[in-house]
Image (spheres, coloured by chain):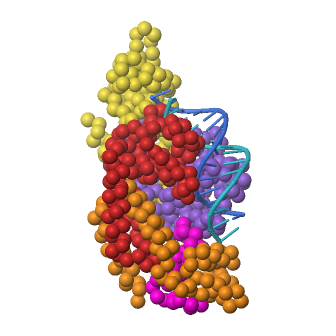
Chain colours: A yellow, B purple, C red, D orange, E cyan, F blue
Amino acid sequence: MIVLNNRSKVPIYAQIKNQIMELVVLGALNENDAIPSIRALAKELSLNFNTVKKAYADLEADGVIYTVVGKGTFIAEGAMDNNTIKHRATSQLGTALHSAFSSGLTKDQIISLVEETYSKFRKDDK
Amino acid sequence: MIVLNNRSKVPIYAQIKNQIMELVVLGALNENDAIPSIRALAKELSLNFNTVKKAYADLEADGVIYTVVGKGTFIAEGAMDNNTIKHRATSQLGTALHSAFSSGLTKDQIISLVEETYSKFRKDDK
Amino acid sequence: MIVLNNRSKVPIYAQIKNQIMELVVLGALNENDAIPSIRALAKELSLNFNTVKKAYADLEADGVIYTVVGKGTFIAEGAMDNNTIKHRATSQLGTALHSAFSSGLTKDQIISLVEETYSKFRKDDK
Amino acid sequence: MIVLNNRSKVPIYAQIKNQIMELVVLGALNENDAIPSIRALAKELSLNFNTVKKAYADLEADGVIYTVVGKGTFIAEGAMDNNTIKHRATSQLGTALHSAFSSGLTKDQIISLVEETYSKFRKDDK
DNA sequence: GTGGTCTAGACCACG
DNA sequence: GTGGTCTAGACCACC
């Protein structure tokens, strides 16, 4: 379900966050679905407990999941169109675009990259 | 000429790199133009010698500038259409786009963000 | 494992780079093998953290090693047939050869030096 | 007569030394030929007096040239087959070869580079 | 524990 | 004056 890249400069906890958000957006996880406990996921991915905990804490702060003590962790209602997430994604993409322009990429090159990435993304989504 | 944001998570040396790249792309710095000496820029920005040096060393490794010991540092020929940097920027933007789609942004939203960022970027060039 | 020459004009960080490259080429270090942590190697060689770090940073930029923050540093896949490094070595050797011819060495003298250096190099590998 | 490369990491004074040695080996300069005075060469190449002085001092220490106060500077007798030069060239080439092997170049690749450089060198010599 | 960044200050080679 | 190397020691994020 979750695939990690040890080599990436993206911290492990951030990779977990991103992939869970992605599963929500793609509809693989729906509102009130249960997700694995911190300990279970840590064991499954051979990670330190604290690494998974940090990912879950961030997701809860973003309103993507909620925890019920003694019950488990679940996808929050409205997670999919959560504004916090979209705002953050927009601002992150904004700085990435700025830096792309700074590197000398043209607007046309960037737009065709958008198209390309979009079709690849739709293909992954089945 | 160079403005730093101390509170940013982006390392200072990276901010310097980015802004110099930007000045090259915008045409404010041209081939064989001299850029400030490491020590002069460090003093101007109240930074340590080594922080500026790291920025310059990275830019030289990327073929954007070249240094002549005892003389100073200069914009390299072909700095603007340097492939190393464009490739890197393309792949970074690709993952940013992927994560934007994952967060539920639509293609239209992203394209209008591209347009918006583009005009903001060109406007900086006055 | 690594032997430094303090009196050499070759910077210490470069000596470390060269010797690690050499260990890879000789097969003493293989893909995904861990190499000593920056701090451990610095302590072992009585060097400053930053000196070893510079060697490692250069090797990573050249694609010979990769680092995982919090985990350590490892030999990259394909480190041994890295083109960046071979190209650089070829051009450096080219200028060295040119200057050897300029000094009046004959082709035969040079070829026998190649043979001699080759056997010495392979002998180091025991 | 002498062409300098400002960009090169090779110090200017070393470039002067190398090119004068080359002219001797190629026979363009013969024993007891006069070479330009330090001041004249510095002016011709737009260099600092001390830069040329250092090159000449090194060449004199190597027995390639000699100075007669009030007369000028001349190519030494036996400069062409000066052992100091050949020994130094041999040892420099030796380390260059060692580092080439360390970078993963094979003996065959190196030998063909020797052949190639040799023919290029003979062609320059007219 | 790991690596990443930054500062303060030193000495060197080069021009 | 320029850049190049190195040390000593600090604080941070991640695991």
Q: Nearer the viewer, residue C83 or B107?
A: C83
**Where does the image place residue A12, in percent across and percent down from the top left?**
43, 32
Q: Quadrant of residue B124?
A: bottom right
Give the quarter of the image for residue C43: top right
Q: Residue at x 63, y 86 (%)?
A: D73
Q: Residue B65: x and y, percent?
A: 55, 63
Query: Relative to D81, is F2 above or below?
Result: above
Examine the rendered structure and indicate whether residue B111 appears above or below residue A18: below
The residue positioned 40% from the left and 40% from the top of the image is: C74
Q: Is residue D29 magenta?
A: yes
User: Is residue C5 in view from this perspective?
Assistant: yes
Residue at point 40%, 25% (across, down): A47
Residue furthest out toward the top: A70
Q: Which residues are magenta?
A: D8-35
Q: Quadrant of the C terminus of chain A?
A: top left
Q: Is residue B77 above or below residue A53?
A: below
| Nearer to me, D13 or C101 | C101
**Relative vertical location of residue B104 with respect to residue E11 in this rendering, above or below:** above
Q: How many marks?
A: 0
